Image (spheres, rainbow, N blue to C red):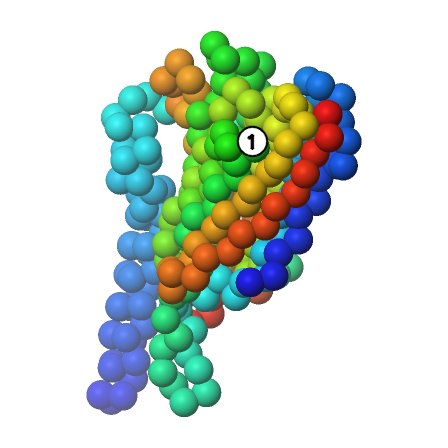
């Protein structure tokens, strides 16, 4: 029964592939994070990502990025970078701001290729990096062609 | 390129004001195909710079992960009366500009 065997081979191959992808899921952002921080430690906290827990349309998901900071000349946020572990291009956007912002908060709308945990990294004026995450469940992915 | 900017007309000195800009742009990802099967090239607004009285107060570097017709909202301290200049450019090299005035 070559057909059935064939089918099983394909099936096990597909399973191995998805398992491999699932295992590597934490990884895709690692090189990007290194680029952003330049090897400095990335602490979690101070950054808040506000987004609907369930986004039924991945083409346009509202995101609010807030960083706890007094936004003074001595202590302010330099930049906020938003990353997606599942988008074909993980770097969504980088926002640069300074003490003149008064408040470290940015609102935008992004595309998300499926359910994932987005990561926002803030660089502060003292050179430290802080991060925040938000889990978004996406029922309709933004890029069906790209996978 | 059509854009709409929203910020208060007047503000008190030192007040933190919200500034919002929405630009009409497809933010083409480069992953889509047209009806004849040809890939539509990536074309997104890659950079937006906002200057307030010639001082840069906000910059956004965007990729294909930003939704079509990008909307951006940020804050700035009203320091003096003057002009906000929003400038952006897309991958095709097309530039756009929008201005707004604030009275402090």
The number of numbered discs placed on residues in the rendered structure image is 1
A45 is higher (above) or lower (below) than B18: above
User: Relative to residue B81, is residue B45 drawn left or right?
Assistant: left
User: Relative to residue A3, is residue B38 drawn left or right?
Assistant: right
Q: Chain of mark 1?
A: B
Name the residue nearer the viewer: A134 or A92: A92
Farthest residue toward the left?
Answer: A2
B12 is higher (above) or lower (below) than A106: above
User: Relative to residue B14, is residue B23 drawn left or right?
Assistant: left
Picture quadrant where residue A43 is located? top left
Name the residue nearer the viewer: A41 or B48: B48
Q: x, y percentage for residue A92?
A: 44, 48
Q: Residues within 10 Å of mark 1 (few under 14, many from 20)?
A: some
Q: Which quadrant: the N terminus of chain A?
A: bottom left
Residue that appears at 41% across and 79% down: B33
Name the residue nearer the viewer: B35 or B21: B21
| Residue A107, visible in the rendered structure | no
Residue that appears at 42% across and 17% down: A125
Residue that appears at 32% across and 33% down: A36
Q: Which quadrant: the C terminus of chain A?
A: bottom left
Helix, strand or loop under label 1: loop
B103 is higher (above) or lower (below) than A73: below
Farthest residue toward the top?
Answer: A74
Report the residue marked by disc 1. Answer: B53
Q: x, y percentage for residue B88?
A: 48, 51
Name the residue nearer the viewer: B80 or A11: B80
Q: x, y percentage for residue A64?
A: 61, 38
Residue that appears at 54% across and 52% down: B97
């Amino acid at each position: 029964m070559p057909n059935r065997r064939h089918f099983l081979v394909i099936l096990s191959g597909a399973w191995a592939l998805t398992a491999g992808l699932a295992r590597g899921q934490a990884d895709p952002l690692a090189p990007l994070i290194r680029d952003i921080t330049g090897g400095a430690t990335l602490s979690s906290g101070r950054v808040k990502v506000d987004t609907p827990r369930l986004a039924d349309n991945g083409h346009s998901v509202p995101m609010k990025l807030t960083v706890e900071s007094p936004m003074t000349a001595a202590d302010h946020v330099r930049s906020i970078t938003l990353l997606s572990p599942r988008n074909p291009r993980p770097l969504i956007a980088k926002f640069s701001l300074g003490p003149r912002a008064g408040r470290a908060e940015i609102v935008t709308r992004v595309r998300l290729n499926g359910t994932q945990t987005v990561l926002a990294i803030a660089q502060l004026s003292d050179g430290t990096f802080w991060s925040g995450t938000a889990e978004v469940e996406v029922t309709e992915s933004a890029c069906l062609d790209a996978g | 390129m059509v854009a709409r900017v929203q910020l208060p007309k007047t503000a008190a000195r030192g007040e933190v004001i919200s500034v919002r800009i929405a630009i009409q742009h497809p933010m083409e990802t480069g992953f889509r195909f047209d009806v004849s099967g040809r890939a539509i090239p990536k074309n997104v607004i890659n950079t937006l710079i906002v200057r307030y009285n010639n001082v840069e107060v906000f910059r956004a570097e965007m990729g294909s992960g930003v939704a079509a017709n990008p909307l951006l909202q940020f804050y700035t301290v009203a320091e003096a009366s003057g002009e906000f200049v929003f400038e952006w450019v897309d991958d095709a090299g097309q530039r756009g500009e929008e201005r707004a005035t604030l009275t402090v």
